[in-house]
Structures are given as structure tokens and as C-alpha cells.
Amino acid sequence: MAINRAKKEEIIAGLKNSLKNSKSTVFVNFHGLSVADTTDLRRKLTQEGLSYTVAKKTLLKRVFEDIAPKGEQPPLDGELAVCYGEDLLAPAREVYEFQKKHKNSITIIGGIFENEYKNKEEMMEIAMVPSPQVLRAQLVNLINSPIQGFVMALNAIAEKREV
């Protein structure tokens, strides 16, 4: 269905405002994703405070020209959607988690990270960064490990002296 000029301008203005204010944007090829899976994806992203928008490539390209990220835009192949939000890592991470469960129906094809275009491989690296909770747990474990070893050594010495 054709979109009239006023509707296109409205879509462009809304996307430009949203993407300009987001810290991270992920380009998603959603070819083969069912309506039920799309609804599930939107629900999960909304719970995380993220937005997911499907728009025509020509409209998105006009938005990208206006917000002017640095670097070279990756190829936007297939059916295109954008996922964006205030968190730097959450859009890529959440789409990646969904992608692992729904292989061959949704893929990350690039994005904008800190106002710079990133290709598929760079966005996948960003998506695989653990969540803050996991990073904190790893830090606590790293700090606790030598202390735990020291306590075990002291316990072994105390047991030896008791015998």
C-alpha cells in the first residue's frame, strides 16, 4: 500500500527524533519472522525499554542522512527493522538473544553505536558483551577467588597443627 507524502514526512520526523536521542541502534533483517514471533519480540524489547520499528529502507536512509553517523553505512539487505534505546548495549544484546532462539528468521545486519556505523561483525561483538549483572558477578568472583584460596590454605595449616 502506498504511503502519502504527509505520512512519509511524519514517519521520517518520528524516526529522526527517536534515533537521534538513542545511544544505540541495531539494523535487523526480519525475513521469515512470524507475526506471533514479532509480537513476542516487541513485548520483550518493550519490557527492556527499547523500541522496534519497521520502515521502508528509503525512509530510513533519509533519516540516516539527517542524523549523519560517522563511517560507512553497512548494506541494508532484506526486510529491515531498527531496534533502538537509551542503553548502549541492550538493543544489540536483546535482538541477539532473540536471534539465538529463532535462527534463520531474524539477523543483525549492522547498526549505529555511539553515532558511528558498525557492520554486522562489530554489532555481534557488542551484542555478546555480558549484562551488567553478569559482569558484577564475574568481578565479585574474581575478587573472592584469592581470598577463598587464602582461607583454604589457612584452614589446611590449622588442621595440620591439630594433628
Image: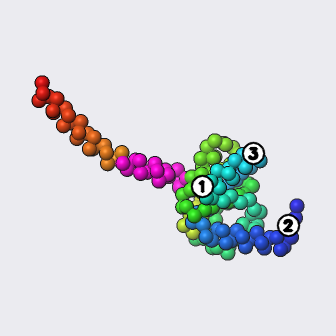
Question: What kind of secondary structure does the magenta stretch mostly adopt?
Answer: helix
Q: The C terminus is located in which quarter?
A: top left
Q: Is residue 122 left or right of residue 62?
A: left
Colouring scheme applied when the structure was drawn: rainbow
The first of marks 2 and 3 along the sequence is 2
- Distance of label 3 from label 1 (alpha carbons): 19 Å
Name the secondary structure under disc 1. loop
Seen at 26% across and 39% down, the residue is: 149
Q: Is residue 125 left or right of residue 149?
A: right
**At 20% from the left edge and 34% from the top edge, which residue is drawn?**
155
Residue of label 2: 3
Task: Say which element carries label 2.
Answer: loop
Q: Residue 117's spot in the image, x, y percent?
A: 59, 65
Q: Nearer the viewer, residue 161 or 31?
A: 161
Q: Which sits in the foreground, 3 or 73? A: 3
**In the image, residue 159 lies at what x, y percent?**
16, 29
Q: Which mark is residue 48?
A: 1
Badge number at residue 102: none
- Magenta residue span: 124-140
Circle 2 crowding by C-alpha within 10 Å: few under 14, some 14–19, many from 20 = few
- Name the residue beneath numbered marker 3: 36
Left or right for 94, reference 58: left
Q: Which quarter of the image is occupied by the N terminus?
A: bottom right
In the rendered image, residue 87, in percent from the top left (x then y), is placed at: 55, 61
Whether pointer 2 and pointer 3 mark residues with C-beta atoms closer than 8 Å, the reply is no
The Cα atoms of the two marked residues, 2 and 3, are separated by 25 Å
- Identify which amino acid the numbered label 1 is placed on: Glu
First along the sequence among labels 3 and 1: 3
Q: Position of residue 75 (x, y in %)?
A: 67, 60
At a point 46% along the width and 48% down the height, the residue shown is: 134
The label nearer to you, 2 versus 3, is 3
